Image (tube, rainbow, N blue to C red):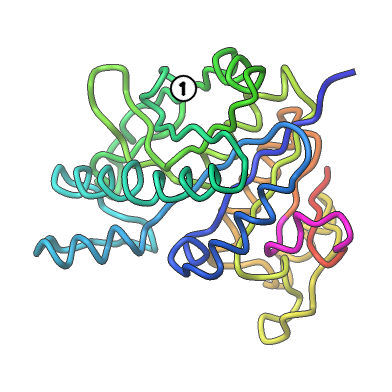
């Protein structure tokens, strides 16, 4: 029987709120067993870019990453945001290890090809070094990933944190019974965006198609749900979406995605 592993992705709105971050990390530190955390930090990167006089360009909510922007996201994601989380977890008794995809060759990627839009130095994941991550977990280390991968040729690449979490969960499923958690400011997938408690508790493939047709799932939730089903189709055991209370076993108001 495989050991259980939790892969948790924390949303940017949580990272940028000091109180919310502390609440999340307290809950994460109490998650039993082996675990990996993935985080972004987009708003912090946008704030630093503005201070440095660098314009942040976005298309459909996705960042255009030129050479200057790669430097900024590396400073913010791999530096400030990552090390702050690592230090706070150390204070809670979690032996955290901050990583980008270049560290230990953990996340290999390629620069996204130019089609209608040139996203610049944005990476699409090719592989996960699951063997090394399994070794780190065996040493009782908790990997903390920022949203940066690399192309193996010396280039760092800005990479969607939801996708990184999904691909890590997929890669680790060969070794562990893996549950993927998308932890953000909402309680789950909502039937009515105006009602915080209208959480849809269970979504399978059939229900997902129905919700799409009804327009319930739209906009930013679309790529997140795509990552959920992508992970499940590749042997991830379970995917859950919700706020920090989801990580508490006594809390049942969140969304569980199954095939």
Residue 214 as seen in the image, left or right of residue 71: right
In this rendered view, identify the residue nearer to me: 195 or 142.
Answer: 142
Q: Quadrant of the N terminus?
A: top right
Question: Dot 1: what SS?
Answer: loop
Q: Does the magenta stretch include residue 29?
A: no
| In the foreground, 185 or 143 | 143
Compared with 82, 211 (above or below) is below
x, y percentage for residue 243? 68, 64
Residue 95 place in picture, x, y as percent: 57, 34
The residue beneath circle 1 is 106
Residue 150 sits in which quadrant? Answer: top left
- At a point 65% along the width and 56% down the height, the residue shown is 26
What segment is highlighted magenta in the picture? Answer: 241-251
Give the residue at x 45% y 25%.
107
240 is higher (above) or lower (below) than 106: below
Q: Residue at x 73, y 48 (%)?
A: 30
Q: Position of residue 216 (x, y in %)?
A: 70, 72
Name the residue: 34% across, 41% down.
Answer: 78
Q: How many labels does the image show?
A: 1
Badge 1 crowding class, 10 Å Cα cut-off, few under 14, some 14 to 19, many 20 or more, is many
Residue 25: quarter of image: bottom right
The quarter of the picture where the C terminus appears is top right
Residue farthest to the left, as pictured? 53
Q: Which of 169 and 85 is in front in this view?
A: 85
Work out whether 48 lies above or below 136.
below
């Amino acid at each position: 029987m495989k050991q259980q592993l939790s892969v948790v992705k924390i949303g940017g709105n949580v990272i940028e709120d000091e109180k919310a971050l502390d609440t999340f990390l307290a809950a994460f530190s109490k998650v039993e067993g082996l675990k990996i955390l993935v985080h972004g930090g987009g708003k912090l990167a946008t704030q630093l870019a503005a201070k440095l006089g660098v314009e942040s360009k976005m298309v459909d909510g996705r960042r255009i990453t030129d050479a200057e922007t790669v430097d900024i996201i590396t400073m913010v994601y791999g530096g400030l945001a990552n090390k702050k989380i690592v230090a706070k977890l150390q204070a809670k008794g979690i032996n955290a290890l901050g990583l980008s995809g270049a560290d230990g060759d953990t996340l290999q990627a390629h620069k996204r090809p130019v089609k209608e839009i040139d996203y610049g130095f944005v990476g699409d994941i090719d592989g996960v070094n699951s063997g090394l991550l399994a070794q780190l977990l065996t040493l009782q280390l908790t990997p903390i990933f920022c949203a940066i991968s690399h192309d193996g040729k010396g280039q760092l690449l800005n990479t969607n944190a939801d996708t990184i979490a999904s691909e890590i969960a997929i890669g680790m499923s060969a070794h562990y019974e893996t549950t993927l958690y998308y932890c953000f400011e909402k309680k789950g997938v909502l039937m009515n965006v105006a009602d915080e408690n209208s959480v849809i508790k269970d979504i399978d493939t059939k229900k997902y198609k129905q919700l799409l047709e009804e327009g319930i799932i739209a906009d930013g939730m679309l790529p997140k749900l795509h990552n959920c089903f992508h992970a499940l189709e590749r042997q991830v055991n379970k995917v859950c979406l919700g706020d920090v209370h989801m990580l508490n076993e006594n809390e049942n108001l969140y969304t569980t995605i199954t095939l």
